[in-house]
Image (cartoon, rainbow, N blue to C red):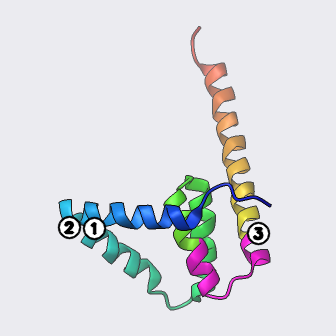
Amino acid sequence: MSAIKDWDAYNAAARAQGKELTALHPELVKGFGALSRGAATTQHLDAKTRELIALAVAITTRCDGCIDAHVRKAKTAGASKAEIAEALGVAIALNAGAAFTYALHALDAAEETAG
């Protein structure tokens, strides 16, 4: 299967731009780092589970940087490609569920609005 994106090049470019943002707004990046460290400090979830959840969320928020980071972290934590695929399945189902729910909102709006 051919690659959709050169993830190693993407990662390198994102890291370079991250350094620029750090220089321009160090307190912002410091706060983001503290938030990330706080989320990674769990007592009940192991690292692999946490990263698979993060990956599923990354899919639903359509964040390439998050996908890159959490695929790498999930693999480091021992996640297999099959486990990653199952987490992606959860994300796909939730996106479909959200679309279904918002379709109901649209039907409601069509019923309730003038025009």
Mark 1 surroundings: few (<14), some (14-19) or many (≥20) residues within 10 A: some
Q: In 3D space, how far apart are the residues under numbered discs 3 and 2 (Cα atoms)?
A: 36 Å
Give the SS element for disc 1. Answer: helix
* Residue 111 lies in quadrant: top right
The quadrant in which the C terminus is found is top right
The prevailing secondary structure element of the residues shown in magenta is helix
Q: Is residue 5 left or right of residue 1?
A: left
Camera-side residue of 97 and 50: 50
Specify few, some or many for label 2: CA neighbours under 10 Å numbering under 14, 14-19, or 20 or more: few
Which of the 4 image quarters holds residue 112? Answer: top right
User: For the residue marked with disc 2, what is the amino acid?
Assistant: Pro
Q: Given contact means CB atoms under 8 Å apart, are the residues at marks 3 and 2 in contact?
A: no
User: Are the residues tagged 2 and 1 within 8 Å (C-beta)?
Assistant: yes
Residue extent of the magenta highlight: 71-84
Question: Residue 8, how many percent across, how many down?
Answer: 55, 68
Of residue 83 and residue 14, the one placed in the foreground of this image is 14
27 versus 93 height, above or below: below
Q: Residues within 10 Å of mark 3 (few under 14, many from 20)?
A: some
Q: Is 102 included in the stretch rendered in magenta?
A: no
Please give the residue where the numbered disc 2 appears in the rendered image: 26
Q: Indicate the position of residue 15 as horizontal and vertical percent values.
A: 39, 67
- The local secondary structure at tag 2 comes to helix
Q: Report the Cα–Cα distance between label 2 and label 1.
A: 5 Å
Numbered circle sitting on residue 85: 3
Kind of residue at disc 3 = Ala
Q: Residue at x 64, y 38 (%)?
A: 102
Which residue position is annotated with label 1?
Answer: 29
